[in-house]
Image: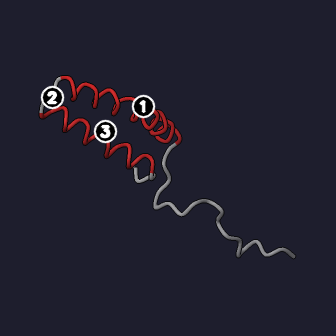
Amino acid sequence: MPRRYFKRNRRPPFKFQVPEWLRAARDVVSQFTIPLIVFQIIRTILFPSGIDFMIILILAILHFCFSYEVL
């Protein structure tokens, strides 16, 4: 008789499950972070302002979070 009562859960140990539509949206946004960062760096070099540095910082944090699956 197989031991079904002590089978391990094969899903990754997440604190909570993310809905599929949110996971798909996260994947789409993560694909656009690098082109947006490059565009923003070029824009900052040509027309520097304080808000441009904030946008680059926000995009870099988003890219870091998406690449290491923090969000």
Q: Position of residue 59 (x, y in %)?
A: 31, 39
Q: Position of residue 66 (x, y in %)?
A: 42, 46
Side (left or right) of 53 relative to 19: left
The furthest residue to the left: 50
**As rendered, which of 21 and 69 lies closer to the eye?**
69
In the rendered structure, which disc, 1 or 3, sits on the residue that comes first in sequence? 1
Side (left or right) of 45 relative to 25: left
Mark 3 lies on a secondary structure that is helix
Q: Residue placed at 53% from the left, 41% from the top? A: 20
Residue that label 1 marks: 32
Residue that label 3 marks: 59
Q: Residue placed at 54% from the left, 63% from the top? A: 13
Q: Amino acid at mark 1?
A: Phe
Q: Residue placed at 44% from the left, 38% from the top? A: 30
In the rendered structure, which disc, 2 or 1, sits on the residue that comes first in sequence? 1
Residue that label 2 marks: 48
Check the image and report above or below for 15 versus 32.
below
Q: Estimate the spatial distance between the alpha carbons at disc 2 and disc 1, rounded to whole Å.
A: 22 Å
Q: Position of residue 43 (x, y in %)?
A: 24, 25
Front tag of 3 and 2 = 2
In the rendered structure, which disc, 3 or 2, sits on the residue that comes first in sequence? 2
Q: Amino acid at mark 3?
A: Leu
Q: Estimate the spatial distance between the alpha carbons at disc 3 and disc 2, rounded to whole Å.
A: 16 Å
